Image (spheres, rainbow, N blue to C red):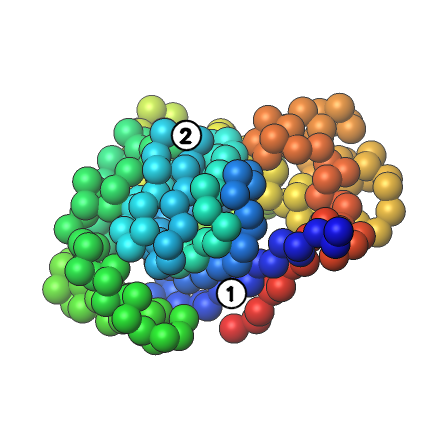
Amino acid sequence: MRARPIIYMYKEYSPCPLLSPYIDKYWELKGNPGYGMRINILPDGCTDFIFTLGEATQAVNSDLKMKPYRAYFIGPMNTYSELTTYTETIHMLGVRFLPCGLSRFIRLPLHELTNQRMNADEVSNFFDTSFTERLCEESSFGDRVKIIEELFIRSLYKHDLPADSQIIFAIEQINRYQGKLSIQSLMDDICLCQRQFERKFKMNTGYTPKIYSRIMKFKNAVDLLRNNTCDNLLSTAVHAGYYDVPHLSREIKNLSGSTPYSFMSRPTSEEEATLTYVEP
């Protein structure tokens, strides 16, 4: 008997120019992964609001059951999360905020919300059940994004919550150097002592500068592995800033739950998986 293919559709939209300093992407995931399938979500230094638009019910690390037609907040993660599907279909829409981006709209102590997953109304009155229902009434991803953007643009003009320029600069530098920049040199550049720097960084991002740098180094390593056409892990490890292959392998395992080779491999048959990626 021929196995039913696992089909996903994943779409990303970039925010409008007015919101691009704060929002990384809007994303949509829908498909039929099958009952009990597990999907690892990797840490990326960002925070998300997620809307469940379909009939699917999911669980994140077994500590949050995501019910249909609700809004949820996913705090900054310093390791991978495991999403388990409990129905045959899934439909989710997310707003992914850049580090420090969420603080332009909501003041939250993100260091207290690291690895936390909760109902959106526990952290903000932005999204209630009626808002999610309104999104469900729209037929296209673009129309749903338009509704979300209208909400955030109104908030920009209504609330004056300027972001911390020193922390924004620090984040930009860490990203630019792909997590390989010395924290000491960064503190010297922004003229902050270690205690002040770590306190402000944690408040705005949910991470210490060291852990955020670690995640950015990991992200770069994953990108290198996905674009690698050979099995030379040593060159990838060195280029990504790791000491050797065992060091790379440990970090990939700790932060993704997988091996480096898993990011280099691709499905070889329709029975294994069919991935559909749709560009904006």
Q: Alpha-carbon neighbours of circle 1 within 10 Å: few (<14), some, or many (≥20)? A: some
Q: Which residue has dot 2 on it?
A: 62
202 and 223: which one is in front? 223
Q: CA distance from mark 1 to mark 2?
A: 26 Å
Query: Is 111 left or right of 39, judged from the image as shown?
Result: left
- Which residue lies at the image location 66% right of the left edge and 44% below the top edge? 222
Mark 1 or 2 closer to N-term? Answer: 1
User: Is residue 16 something one can see in this rendering?
Assistant: no
**Residue type (three-letter) at the residue carrying disc 2:** Ser
Q: Is residue 6 above or below residue 178?
A: below
Q: Is residue 174 above or below residue 234?
A: below
Query: Is 252 left or right of 132, judged from the image as shown?
Result: right
- Which residue lies at the image location 25% right of the left edge and 42% below the top edge? 119
Of badges 1 and 2, the one in the foreground is 2
Q: Which residue has dot 1 on it?
A: 11
**Residue type (three-letter) at the residue carrying disc 1:** Lys
Residue at the left extreme, as displayed:
158
Query: Is 6 left or right of 92, judged from the image as shown?
Result: right
- Which residue lies at the image location 28% right of the left edge and 38% below the top edge? 118
Res 25 → quadrant: bottom left
Secondary structure under badge 1? strand
